[in-house]
Image (cartoon, coloured by chain):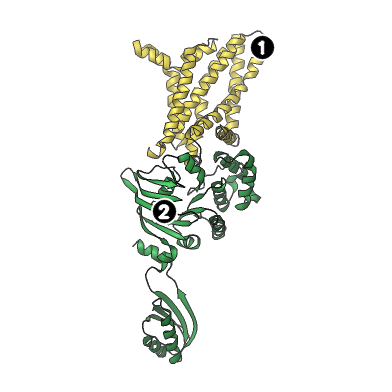
Chain colours: A green, B yellow
Amino acid sequence: MISVKHISKQFGVCEALKNISFEIPSGEIVGFLGQNGAGKTTLMRILTAYLPPSSGEAFICGENILSHPVGIRRKIGYLPENPPLYSTMTVKNYLRFAARLKDVSVKYEKAQVDHVLSECHLLEVKDHLIATLSKGYKQRVGIAQAIIHEPEVIILDEPTNGLDPVQIQHVRQLIRRLESKRTVIISTHILSEIEQLAQRVLILKKGEIVADNAIEQIVVSDEKKQLFVTVKGKEEMIEQAVKEANDVKQINIKFLEDDLFEVHLENTNNVSHYNQMIQSFLKYQVKIVSMREKKNSLEEAFLKIHK
Amino acid sequence: MKKIFAIAQKELSVYFRSPIAYVVLIVTIVIFNVFFFAIIDNNEEATLRDIFKVMEFLFVFIIPILTMKVFSEEKQMGTMEFLMTTPTQNNEIVLGKYLGVLLFFSFLIILTIPYYGIIEFFSRPDRMAILTGYIGIWLEGAFFISIGLMVSSWTKSQIVAAILSYLFLFLVYFSSLADKYTNGVVKAIVKYSNVMTHSENFIVGILSSSDLIYFFSGILFCLVMTRISIDTKIWDNV
């Protein structure tokens, strides 16, 4: 579906992208993750045939972006970082304008505008001037224009940037609905967003891809699992119990109240070690009140990469 | 073609949804009216010759106000990226925008037609001269608009676009002042490049191919330059 081969991009002396290559199969939802200035927007602009690469080539649905820019743009729906809206137009007029520029046939124009208005929950503001809309609505109008011509690939540059939590939730739900039908690329520096939305993540650092994996792989690739066990018993007994359980390393014991303690343990991924530890607690008459496992978040993986 | 009209329609709606359209139309027509009555009262002639001259002089000042935002604003608002990532050819973007401003300008010209009605009612004017005069000022305005469009495609700043447009329009309009300080080939070039050399012929009723070529080639040159500046995204580099 999308194939990028050895793409580089220079702006004067600044090298924004360095020899980037990757493939995205059809129907996948991929996150571009990176700090500001890592090259996410530049890469997206190259994929939408807005900027030509300095070297290398990219194909979308088998077509070269350099030789068929207009054909490529018909297959792509793009939402730039700041939604590109005309503040003096109404939502409906703007979407009709977008439909015309994106080769939606006159016959289907009205139906298509109505369809995206309802898909993006914009029906109640369709006759409002864009200037009067809240940021969340503006973002949804931006997404509506990106999908109005039923593109096969949707590219969204930081779609939840600057929104409040409720608006973020709305936009995420909308993106999740898109994913079932199309290939979606999202860039963001909000890590939890990628975890919630994408199946695969490309981490960019200073113009290079430093990680390209399924999210689970990046998250569990190294490190041991962290386990927090709330227990009831005497402190010496608890310490003794943990000591006796092989392969379980105690990091910390935190006093909660009376005889309640939270034990922070580091464990390998092996289930038998859990059993061993539980047995050990029972032996020393330490009651287990609750257990919670903390997975390494993508955020930790990301910060580690950027160290 | 569909996209050219869609863009032109959008340009017109942007004008009419902002105060610019109404301020330009009202102020210009008021000034034209004052001059029309002053000229008729003073000359007592059934001709629009002098009012055409006032009109072309005022166009030098009005047209940059219409064209300064055409591309600059799109670049500043980020909508240029939207236009250029839709399957629209850059030619269609340039022509659509040109057509939009040209239609607005034509509307302004249409508002002056009552002047012809008035002099036709009271006497017998030279209809041919009035017709060629209208063609002349319309072409001159169309040429000025293409200059404004070209300049607006160079920069993100509306102010810079307006100032540079004034510079270029002053050059083509007032270059006749340099006439007496030059001679030989330079004099001929200065004379040919001056817009009034050509518009004057239209105003007195002469329709010549040399004048038509001057305006059409000028418009074409500016539109091609606009297209090139969009292709190269020159505003990102300056």
Question: As rendered, which of A128 and A296 lies closer to the eye?
Answer: A296
Q: Which one is in front, A278 or B163?
A: A278
- Image point (45%, 21%), residue name: B218
Identify the residue position indicated by label 2 in the image. A23
Kind of residue at badge 1: Glu
* Three-letter code for the amino acid on which mark 2 is drawn: Glu
Labels 2 & 1 near each other (Cβ < 8 A): no
Mark 1 highlights which residue? B120
Under circle 1, the secondary element is helix
Residue farthest left in this picture: A13
For label 2, the crowd category at 10 Å Cα-Cα, with few meaning under 14, some 14 to 19 and many 20 or more, is few
Q: Quadrant of residue A301?
A: bottom left
Q: Is residue B200 left or right of residue B13?
A: left
Front-lying residue, B164 or A283: A283
User: x%, y% of residue B109?
Assistant: 59, 22
- Which residue appears at 60% of the width and 15% of the height? B38
- Disc 2 to disc 1, how far (Cα)? 73 Å
In the depicted structure, whether residue A302 falls above or below residue A96: below
Query: Which chain does tag 2 point to?
Result: A
Q: Are marks 2 and 1 on the same chain?
A: no
Frontmost of labels 2 and 1 is 2
Quadrant location, the C terminus of chain B: top left
Image spot of residue A25 (x, y percent)? 46, 54
* Subunit ID for the residue under disc 1: B
In the picture shown, does residue A152 fall above or below B194? below
B55 over A286 or under it: above or below: above
Task: Using a 10 Å C-alpha cutoff, classify the residue at mark 1 as few (fewer than 14 neighbours), some (14 to 19) or many (20 or more).
Answer: some
Quarter of the rendering occupied by the N terminus of chain B? top right
The quadrant where residue B157 appears: top left
Using the rendered image of the protein, determine whether residue A128 is visible from the camera's viewpoint. Answer: no
